[in-house]
Image (tube, grey):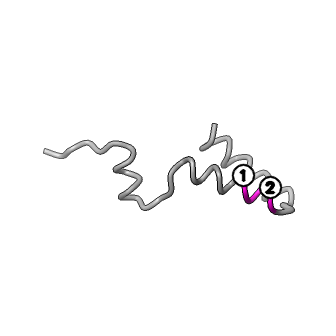
Amino acid sequence: MIEELNLQEMEEIKGGVSKEEYCATLVDIVMSNDLDDGAMDGARHGYDKHCR
């Protein structure tokens, strides 16, 4: 029988970063750089989708 994985276990397998780390990095990028409109729209989309 296959065991169901929790979110933390799936993230470890996937090799991604935690939500908190992603959101903190995204905010740092936005605050530390002069982004054009397209990059800012992408940052907003990422924040709205993953950080709210």
The residue that mark 2 highlights is: 31
Under mark 2, the amino acid is: Met
What range is drawn magenta here?
Answer: 27-32
Measured from the top left, where is residue 18 in percent x and y? Answer: 50, 51
Q: Quadrant of the C terminus?
A: top right
The residue depicted at 29 percent of the width and 45 percent of the height is 5
Q: Quadrant of the N terminus?
A: top left
Q: Could you tell me how many numbered marks the image carries?
A: 2
For the residues bearing labels 1 and 2, Cβ distance under 8 angstroms: yes
The residue depicted at 38 percent of the width and 56 percent of the height is 12
Camera-nearest residue between 30 and 38: 30
Within-10-Å neighbours for mark 1: few <14, some 14–19, many 20+: some
Within-10-Å neighbours for mark 2: few <14, some 14–19, many 20+: few
Camera-nearest residue between 17 and 44: 17
- Tell me the distance, in whole angstroms, between the alpha carbons under discs 1 and 2: 6 Å
Measured from the top left, where is residue 35 in percent x and y? Answer: 84, 61
